Image (spheres, rainbow, N blue to C red):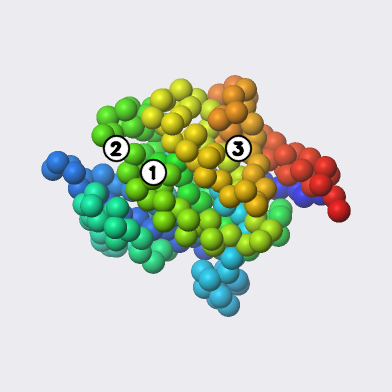
Amino acid sequence: MVSFSFIPADDLKRKYNVYGNFYNVEHEGSCKKYRNDLHIIDKECFDQHGLSQPIELLAIMMNPGESTPLFSNYRIPLFTREKVIMRKHCLDPIPAKPDRTQYQVMRMMNGLEIKHSRVINISDIRDTQSGSFAVDLESEISDLHSIFSESREQELTNIYSSLADDAFVFLAWGRDIIDCEPFKLLAEKCISTLPQDKVVLGIAGEDYLKFKHPLQRGRGGTPRSWLQEAENCLNEYFTNNQG
């Protein structure tokens, strides 16, 4: 049985490091902010192995929100869409500031006693407001902003290949965002690509594509209640699959 404690953020920052890959994309005179990858790793594990240890937990979320590079003077590289298709944006991760969503993943890691997790998103677009994010998706002319785009298949394959043999995938991109048709289509692509040899879990909603987000707002959702539901989800799986 696992137990997820609501550990304070300051204690979590002392235990885990966060590394992300941030990039910007230019298109028709505008510049959009993106992040395509994020690692959360126990500091002692990182000191011994860097980021080379296999991934024990892959969390799939909605989009990057408050996470930013740790150092404010870091110059985020700018790419064209063509360069993204060529995977030029897949650089070595840099130190990043954790956000409240990532603290929830850390609490799961602590309860599960795992050392290395990875977070990817249905969309790479960095936006802290789900409402404006949904509007932005409606105006996108392609799905290149998503790692689940067919144009980025190799990038996704590389991430799946980094998973440990006993790793599991936890879906947590939210419920209301599924009402946004472009997001729904990408979520369906995500489901269709999930590795068949890995356990896939999530706090399911009333629709098969709706999985509660760690910071679910409204309808009784709180970070603490999400953590409790995630704990129940894991324990139910372990109970039903003992031996």
Query: Where, by quadrant of the figure, is residue 203 drawn?
Result: top right
| Distance (Cα) linking label 3 and label 2 | 33 Å
Q: Which of marks 2 and 1 is nearer the N terminus?
A: 2
Label ID, residue 142: 2
In the image, residue 145 sits, relative to residue 20, either above or below, namely: above
What is the count of numbered marks?
A: 3
Left or right for 23, reference 185: left
Say whether disc 3 or disc 2 marks the residue closer to the N-terminus: 2
Q: Tell me where residue 182 appears, x and y as whole percent.
A: 38, 30
Badge 2: residue crowd in 10 Å (few <14, some 14–19, many ≥20) = few
Give the percent coordinates (x, y) of residue 153. Answer: 41, 51
The correct choice, above or below, for 167 with respect to 209 in the image is below
Under circle 1, the secondary element is: loop
In the image, is 108 to the left or to the right of 123? right
The residue sitting at 55% across, 24% down in the picture is 218
Label 1 sits on what residue type?
Ser
Q: Are marks 2 and 1 in contact (CB under 8 Å)?
A: yes
The x, y position of residue 178, in whole percent, is 48, 27
* 3 and 1 marks in contact (CB < 8 Å): no
State the mark number for residue 223.
3
Which three-letter amino acid code belongs to the residue tagged 2? Answer: Ser
Q: How far apart are marks 3 and 1 (CA)?
A: 30 Å
How busy is the neighbourhood of tag 3: few (under 14 within 10 Å), some, or many (20 plus)? Answer: some
- At label 3, the amino acid type is Pro
Q: Which of marks 3 and 1 is nearer the N terminus?
A: 1
- For mark 3, give the secondary structure: helix
Which dot marks residue 149?
A: 1
